[in-house]
Image: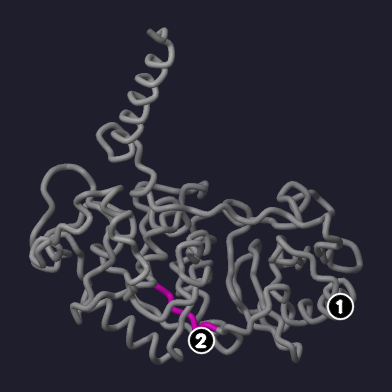
Amino acid sequence: MKEEELRRCQIQEWYPLFKPYSIRTLFHPIPDDFRRYILGEPPTATSHADGGTDGGDLPPPFRLPLPASGLDPLPRSTSTIDPISVLDSDPTAFIEESDSESDHRAPSFPDLESSVEQSIAALGGAVFPKLNWSSPKDAAWIAADGSLRCTSFAEISLLLHSSDRAVHDLCHAADSCSDRSSSTNFSFFLALRKFYPALRPEMEFRCFVRRRRLLGISQREVTAFYPSLVDRRRELRRLVEDFFDEVVCPRFGLDDYTFDIYVNGNGKIKLLDFNPWGAFTLPLLFSWEELETEGFGEDEEVEFRLVETQCGVRPGLKTAVPYDYLDTSEGSGWDQFFRMADEELKLQMKEDAEPVK
């Protein structure tokens, strides 16, 4: 993969060329302090609500950005919490922290928050977030409804901070570029896409283009079997081939790439994304080895692969957990917990080994 191929597949690069054929999207440049927040890096002085900084070299605990309104960005009810059980596990749980101490450690991004909230309203009140290449799909586990539907800046922040895919975009996207240099640099954007709750996952497909030829089409949701797709294979293949010939190929400047689409109920196609050929792009029901084999895709019909039976279902993407929750390094909370548990286990084993007097 070349750096130019990676750049062409950024959503802010391809979207203006395909706006009439895609989902409405609004863009926000990502300031450096918010990028650091996503990565879990120590905040700079200007990213704190009160201009203060954290002491010491330890990374700060994860906190949602302090909203401009000062209200809890994710209101929750505590009526079902048993204070006795909480106190048993954490005697300091109900010791109040002063507002100044809380604000001192909570980052704040008022300008970005304001512009993002305006975009959410303009897009109907709910959006699907992504960065230059990737969406935080691996962090959907942390959302209340298990989806990427976001209605606030706080929800977007939570997803991005919890996502390995976001970290990949911000830190490692160019790692697979054969011509990567020390001067490689990208401007990062938060893309907010209008959220459609009625989209059917079985109607999403990934298409593979090699030397400007459509070689293969794969069902994108490989974790389920949809019998109706098998009966519609020929019809769907024709729709995708026509869309590629009339819309994608004449406008997109690369020779090798993949693109993702959604087929509406009326047979209209919406362009969802472009991805580089190979590298970190998943081949789904294909393999990169066969796609790059000389002569593959030269048959009369484009290879269209579906999950044909329930036995053909593939496992889904792994989920991700914020590093804050998994840090077991020396001195971390988990390190201390494991040390105490190990000492307690040794003590019990010693007592069990002693003869009864």
167 or 216, nearer to the observer: 167
Neighbours of disc 1 within 10 Å: few (<14), some (14-19), many (20+) = few
Which label belongs to residue 24?
2
Q: Secondary structure at mark 2?
A: loop
What's the amino acid at mark 2?
Answer: Arg
Left or right: residue 14 versus residue 85 is right
293 in relation to 98, above or below: above
Amino acid type shown at disc 1: Arg
Residue 46 falls left or right of residue 289: left
Q: Nearer the viewer, residue 10 or 222?
A: 222
Q: Tag 1 or tag 2, which sits nearer the N-term?
A: 2
Residue 264 percent location from the top left of the image: 70, 86
Figure quadrant of residue 300: bottom right
The stretch of residues the image draws in magenta is 190-195
Q: How many circles with numbers are drawn on the protein?
A: 2
Task: Give the residue at mark 1.
Answer: 232
Q: CA distance from mark 2 to mark 1?
A: 28 Å
